[in-house]
Amino acid sequence: MNKKQSKYHDKLNAIYQAGYRKGIEGKSRAKAIRSKCLDCMCCQQTEVRECVIQECPLWAYRMGGPPEIV
């Protein structure tokens, strides 16, 4: 992690820090996506679940799984 990322990491709630770290370090694509969604929704899990911004390229992946094929 660079200095900026480390500073941001330290401000996160402890329950999100491990996921953020794995996402930043490239160890988990799902954790990286989830961390970005939490960042967008001010770390509110319910807001991520209820997100209606379908224009977001990560929207289909926000819950950690692959999108449903329609």
Image (cartoon, helix red, strand yellow):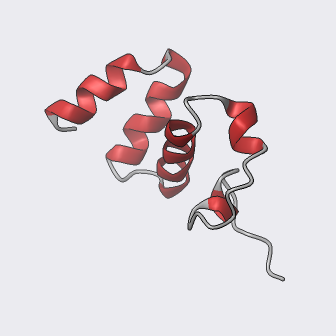
Q: Residue at x 58, y 63 (%)?
A: 56
Quadrant (top left, top right, bottom left, bottom right) of the N terminus = top left
Q: Residue at x 65, y 29 (%)?
A: 44
Q: Residue at x 43, y 36 (%)?
A: 20
Task: Name the image quarter holding residue 2.
Answer: top left
Quadrant (top left, top right, bottom left, bottom right) of the C terminus = bottom right
Q: Is residue 6 above or below residue 48?
A: above
Q: Is residue 26 left or right of residue 34?
A: left
**Residue at the extreme right of the image, as rendered:** 70
Q: Position of residue 43 (x, y in %)?
A: 57, 29
Q: Position of residue 15 (x, y in %)?
A: 55, 21
Q: Is residue 35 left or right of residue 41?
A: left
Q: Is residue 15 above or below residue 46?
A: above
Q: Is residue 61 left or right of residue 5?
A: right
Q: Position of residue 62 (x, y in %)?
A: 65, 53
Q: Nearer the viewer, residue 7 or 65?
A: 7
Q: Position of residue 8 (x, y in %)?
A: 32, 27
